[in-house]
Image (spheres, grey):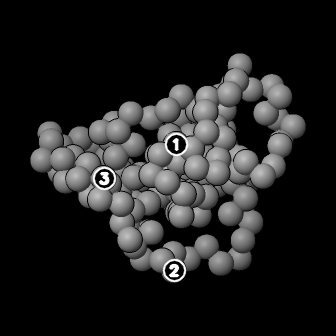
Amino acid sequence: MIDPTVVALAGALRLAQPTAIDLRQTECIADAVYHESRGEPLAAQIAVASVVVNRGRPCVVVSARGQFAYRRRVDRRHHDVAAWRQSAEVALLVQSGAVRAIPATHFHDTTVAPAWAARMTYVGRAGGMEFWRAS
């Protein structure tokens, strides 16, 4: 089920002044949101999209070797249509600036404690994910 907040925000964006959006980049952001945070609360999905946007050109960021675990999987299709739609809407909202991005550049699942986190500044937690930025 699509979060009603996303539907309302996306509707508001459509009514706002049009902005130049690169839809290929939006798709790359959405792909990361879908595979990394589908099933997480909306705040976590927005935060994952923020990380991708904050790190530079989304398609370059998500395809960089070793950056996103889901990229190592053989099957990266979007089987859950509703979750894919929401991921695309979240990506569009963050990329367009309609939803303010959080200042994070990294994230991980709370079940792990990556070594790189010791060199980062903690930004916060959303759902089962923690978010960080360079110190």
The spot of residue 109 in percent (x, y) is 71, 51
Figure check: 57 above or below 90? above
Task: Between label 3 and label 1, give the one nearer the viewer.
Answer: 3
Q: Mark 1 or mark 3, which is nearer the start of the sequence? A: 3
The answer to which of 68 and 118 lies nearer the viewer is 118
Tell me which residue sits at (61%, 39%) in the image.
125
Which residue, given by chain and number where applicable, does mark 1 sit on? 47
Q: Residues within 10 Å of mark 1 (few under 14, many from 20)?
A: many
The answer to which of 76 and 131 lies nearer the viewer is 131
Residue 72, by quadrant, is: bottom right
Helix, strand or loop for disc 3: helix
Q: Mark 2 or mark 1, which is nearer the start of the sequence? A: 1
Tell me which residue sits at (51%, 75%) in the image.
78
The spot of residue 79 in percent (x, y) is 51, 80
Q: Amino acid at mark 3?
A: Thr
Helix, strand or loop for disc 1: helix
The spot of residue 54 in percent (x, y) is 53, 34
Which residue, given by chain and number where applicable, does mark 2 sit on? 79
Figure check: 125 above or below 8? above
Q: Amino acid at mark 2?
A: His
Q: Residues within 10 Å of mark 2 (few under 14, many from 20)?
A: few
Q: Amino acid at mark 1?
A: Ala
54 left or right of 9?
right
Query: Answer yes or no: do the residues labelled 3 and 2 have beta carbons within 8 Å?
Result: no
Which residue, given by chain and number where applicable, does mark 3 sit on? 5
The answer to which of 113 and 53 lies nearer the viewer is 113
| Cα gap from disc 1 to disc 2, whole angstroms | 22 Å
| Quarter of the image that includes the N terminus | bottom left
| Cα gap from disc 3 to disc 2, whole angstroms | 22 Å
